[in-house]
Image (cartoon, rainbow, N blue to C red):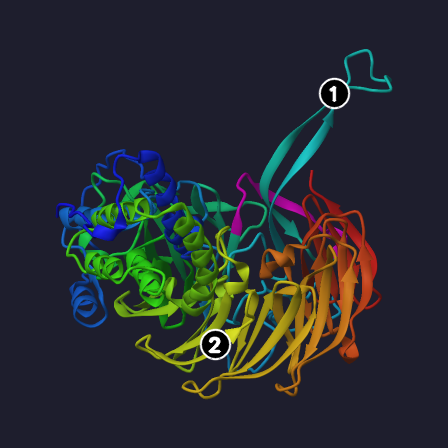
Amino acid sequence: MPNEEFNVPNYNLSPGDPGKRGKTFQIILVVGLVLIFGLELGYIIYKERGQAPSDNQQQTQEVKQTDKKQDAEEKRGLKAFTDAADFKAYLLDAANISQQYYGVNMGMGRRGMMAVDDFSLAIPEATGLEAPSTKATAPGAGNSDTTVDRFSQTNVQVQGIDEPDIVKTDGKEIYLSTSFYKPVVNPTPGQEKMIMPYYGGNYSELTALIKALPLAEMGIDATVNLYGNLLLKDKNLVVFANDKITAFDVSDAKKPVQKWELKYAEDNQYTGARLYGDKIYLVTQTYLGNYSPCPIKPYTIDGVDISIACGDIYHPVQTAPVDTTYNISVLDINSGAVLNKTAVVGSSSDSQLYMSMDSIYLTYNSPTDILKVMVNFFEENSDIFPADLVARLKKVSTYDIGASAKMVEYDSIMSNYTASLSNDDELKLQNEMENRMTDFMKKHVRELMQTGIVKINVAGLQISAQGMVPGDLLNQFSLDEYEGSLRVATTSGGRGSYMFNSDQSISDVYVLDKALNVVGSVTGLGAGERIYSVRFIEDKGYVVTFKETDPFYVLNLKDHKSPTLAGELKIPGYSSYLHPLKENIILGVGREDQNVKLSLFDVTDPKNPKEISKYSLKEYWSDVLNTHHAFIQDDKYQAFFMPGSDGGYMFSYAGNKLSLLKAVSGVRAKRGLFINDYFYVVGDNNLIVLDEKKWERVKELKLE
């Protein structure tokens, strides 16, 4: 559509004065810039999409999924691509949406960025607030040095589903994947007694199979030259290395035998995985190219290409900026066979993946139409803008043209208007906009960024629902399924926005039904703050927001349609991980005054939560702040382990009071685990064993 002149006689346009036109045009762009950054789009700016053509060819699918397409198209606002041309057209539309943000292409991929923080699985718990760290039992006496009575498992979000981590144990063997620098002294021949010989070294990356019991025989049985997270099931050890996944038979710990291997394609990378039963649920992401976006060949297994056809790749009906496909596969852990697969397009900038026993949830950023938001600002402030200007802009927002073309129209109209202003009017407008924008953003903050949620049935991998909530998510704990409802914690505003006043951010918790319709919410948590940690436990929710103090919120979620804020507590510092130690006692792990901070919260009375004990650990950082896998609880001794850079720390929570039982020096602690009554402090290149009955060192093993 050609540009029309904005012809209002009293505007005194001066097209011959380009200096004035450029200067005054910058004023009105403040509106657009603030809104753009208010949308948190600085958080999802990408590099240009790779242009390398793909020669992928469609293969025969192992599972026919025609009914998935019908379900998606007819019911849930998602549908499958019909062919590569359809996929290309969608990418062009997505690029147009991105380009409206002052010409910056937001929808293209950034290779090498690990976009999805976590791939979480959850099974509804029937055991109340029991800590997620579980123990296995076997016949025999618990104090025996050869018979295994109990051993710890990886700390996961919900019991029953394993998550990959750098250490695993079956009670007899410890499987540790580690990397460390090993210095080597190389004196010059004949000068071995020199005070300052030449030092060299090498960087070791390996997975070690370590005999744990009997303690007197503790040692390395074998090593594998691979480094990455691990899964363990029935003597199947799976190593998730940087560019591949390799499974070993470890029935004979001294001679691990490779069973199968999956290698990622060049434009594909690992996102997450979980183990339920004997099936691995693997999620990878493939960065999109322009020329041949489908079919997708994300990886090979034992040299055989695995392909996902165009008709098995789904996208929202409403076009959104996308740069990647999330490829969801079900693998047999014994053979590596692909049992099922599908894919959904999304954004690699800030997506989360969550899985329950029945469903997989994919989230993606869905920014609003920025022009509509800008027109809304003009309409609500019509007393400082001419009525015909507002009407003209509103009309442009309704044009049936691309988003970038609408922005060209907008720029033309606003350029003509701002060139008509006198210096006095210019100064007044500048001040008026700055003041009114703050109030506008507070009022409309939830409209500026939304999170789309796609629900995929585990059985058959069929698209079953699509939903939308305001704001964005923190991590895997922001999502939780309970009694058929999905609870989602979000923050609107603030992050990634240097022109966005942080006081305008707000956090909410939404309850969605099986169709992902919002049926209840608790809104207005932590005005001017962002969510730092979330934990949903049965019909309760716990949320921590932070700016200067740490508001700890307790939510009553028993009535899905009428959830309420039960109580709150404000204390210094913040908690970035929340863990239920026992019924009504929640541990918060965070930081205060540059130290790692531990807090015990008593939530017996949800209306009056209390911090009943706290401890300041003289460590700047702990891996628990980065991953919940680093936390381990031993409820037999009412103790938990905290790794640190200066050592490892065993804490007691007996009597609902935090006390330091043992500090272990000489180890850069990463993890901890227990077998019978021995606790193993796992470092980069050594293991230190404690007797839990006396909390004394009894053994150390160094990895050479």
What's the residue at 21%, 46% (across, down)? Answer: 92
Q: Nearer the viewer, residue 194 or 108?
A: 108
Tell me if residue 99 can be seen.
Answer: yes
Give residue 173's quadrant in the image. Answer: bottom right
Give residue 49's quadrant in the image. Answer: top left
Q: Is residue 294 above or below residue 599?
A: above
Q: Is residue 704 above or below residue 589?
A: above
Circle 1: is it few (<14), some (14-19), or many (20+) Cα within 10 Å? Answer: few
Q: Which residues are magenta?
A: 215-229
Mark 2 or 1: in front is 2
Which amino acid type is shown beneath numbered disc 2? Thr
- Marks 2 and 1, how far apart in space? 64 Å
Residue 325 among those drawn in magenta: no
Dot label at residue 186: 1
Residue labelled with disc 2 = 523
What's the residue at 32%, 56% (across, down)? Answer: 370
Give the structural element (helix, strand or loop) at label 2. Answer: strand
Q: Nearer the viewer, residue 139 or 358?
A: 358
Contact flag, marks 2 and 1 (Cβ < 8 Å): no
Query: Can you give x and y, in whole percent of width and height, for residue 666 in the image?
Result: 79, 47
Give the structural element (helix, strand or loop) at label 1. Answer: loop
Image quadrant in which the C terminus is located: top right
Query: Can you give x and y, in whole percent of width and height, for residue 281 in the image?
Result: 39, 60
Apparent side of residue 11 relative to residue 347 in the rendered image (left or right): left
Q: Nearer the viewer, residue 453 or 185?
A: 453
